Amino acid sequence: MKTKVHDLTTDQLEQQLIRLETYVAQARARQIGLLREADQRQAPLADGCRSLHEWTAGRLDVAPETAKALVTAARVLTDQPHLEETLEQGVVSFDRILATGQLAAAGAGTDRIEQSAGFDIPGIRRLTARYRQMSRPNQQEVF
């Protein structure tokens, strides 16, 4: 018999929320892999769509922002298999993977990416913004 939400203790409520987020992360990882394959097969073009973003939004019935996040993750994680693996395992959330992948794409080194594991998601985004503001060519000009 299914326990009613109001009968759950606060701890049980929290544990169920965390467990469900694990499932969401695992489902997103699978979607990312499938989107990458659809992109390689050029399925969006064959269906008359202008982009993978447009195709994803239409096929999955998601907001353009969600489609963009999924497609961005599919492309960024191609070069970050260790991040994709943690998503597949449900160890971290989709939002954390997207933020960390964008940090890597901005040029952060492995040590900085590992350090960001202790940051909250807004902290990772702030760090990414700093890397984007100060690209390597700009750093050389300063020194």
Image (spheres, helix red, strand yellow):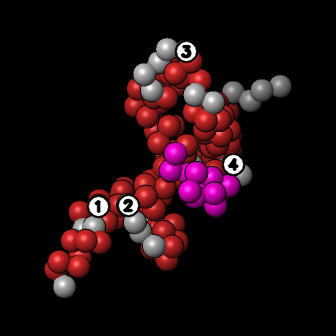
Closest to the observer, 9 or 56: 56
Task: Mark 2 vs mark 3: give the one in front.
Answer: 3
Residue range highlighted in magenta: 75-85
- On the image, numbered disc 1 is attached to which residue? 132
Which residue, given by chain and number where applicable, does mark 4 sit on? 88
Instruction: Give SS at disc 2.
Output: loop
Q: Is residue 117 visible?
A: yes
Marks 1 and 2 close (CB-CB < 8 Å)? yes
Q: Secondary structure at mark 4?
A: helix
Q: First in sequence, mark 2 or 4: give its number.
A: 4
Residue 3, position as x, y percentages in the image: 74, 29
Q: Position of residue 38 (x, y in %)?
A: 62, 30
In the visual, does 112 lie left or right of 27? left
* Mark 3 element type: loop
Residue 123 in sight from this viewpoint: no
* Residue reaching furthest to the right: 1
Q: Which residue is mark 2?
A: 106
- What is the distance, in whole Å, between disc 3 and disc 1 at their CAs? 35 Å
Q: Give the position of the C terminus as an image quadrant.
A: bottom left
Disc 4 marks a residue whose amino acid type is: Glu
Crowd tier of the residue under label 4, counting other residues whose Cα lies within 10 Å: few below 14, some 14–19, many 20 or above: many
> Which label sits on residue 47?
3
Q: CB atoms at circles 2 and 4 under 8 Å apart?
A: no
Q: Position of residue 21 (x, y in %)?
A: 61, 42
Label 3 environment density (alpha carbons within 10 Å; few <14, some 14–19, many ≥20): few
Name the image quarter holding the N terminus: top right
